[in-house]
Image (cartoon, rainbow, N blue to C red):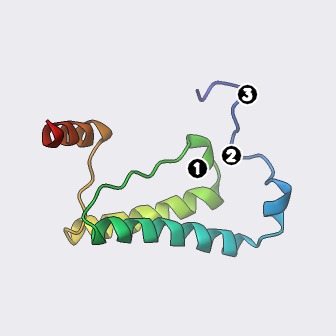
């Protein structure tokens, strides 16, 4: 998919409504969303699946936010608050528990 010329590259201009929201505000809202999702999963001892398109990380502004969230995840792993699994591992676990 990275070779497709029809997919966004992450380098395109922001859509007009977002241009008027300051970068720091957008970053704050995104990090708050991610952190809240993680805290809720920890609180309820449940699975959390977050994902992003590669083109969403294709610039420094967006990548820095994702890197900061990965730092939070790394800290939670170190504190044994979360366990990170591949989708296959999670699927196998869910099937085993449902079966």
Identify the residue shown where x is 18% and y is 42%.
93
| 76 left or right, relative to 59 | left
Within 10 Å of disc 1 (Cα), the crowding (few <14, some 14-19, many 20+) is some
Whether tag 1 and tag 3 are in contact, CB under 8 A, the answer is no
> What is the distance, in whole Å, between disc 1 and disc 3 at their CAs?
17 Å
User: Where, quadrant-wise, is the C terminus in this rendering?
Assistant: top left
As drawn, 95 above or below 63? above
Task: Say few, some or many: other residues with alpha carbon within 10 Å of mark 3 (under 14 / 14 to 19 / 20 or more).
Answer: few
Residue placed under numbered mark 1 in the picture: 57
Closest to the observer, 89 or 3: 89
Mark 2–mark 1 Cα distance, whole angstroms, equals 7 Å
Question: In the rendering, at what x and y percent does residue 40 appear?
Answer: 36, 69
Element type where label 1 sits in the image: helix
Decide which of tag 1 and tag 3 comes sooner along the chain.
3
Q: Which residue is mark 2?
A: 10
Q: Position of residue 44 (x, y in %)?
A: 28, 67
Few, some or many C-alpha atoms within 10 Å of disc 2 (few <14, some 14-19, many ≥20)? some
Q: Which residue is mark 3?
A: 6
């Amino acid at each position: 998919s990275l070779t497709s010329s029809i997919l966004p590259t992450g380098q395109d201009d922001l859509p007009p409504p977002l241009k008027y929201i300051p970068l720091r505000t957008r970053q704050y809202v995104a990090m708050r969303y991610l952190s809240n999702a993680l805290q809720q999963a920890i609180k309820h001892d449940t699975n959390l699946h977050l994902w992003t398109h590669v083109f969403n990380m294709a610039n420094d502004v967006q990548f820095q936010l994702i890197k900061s969230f990965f730092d939070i995840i790394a800290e939670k792993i170190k504190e044994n608050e979360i366990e990170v699994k591949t989708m296959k591992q999670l699927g196998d676990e869910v099937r085993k528990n449902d079966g």
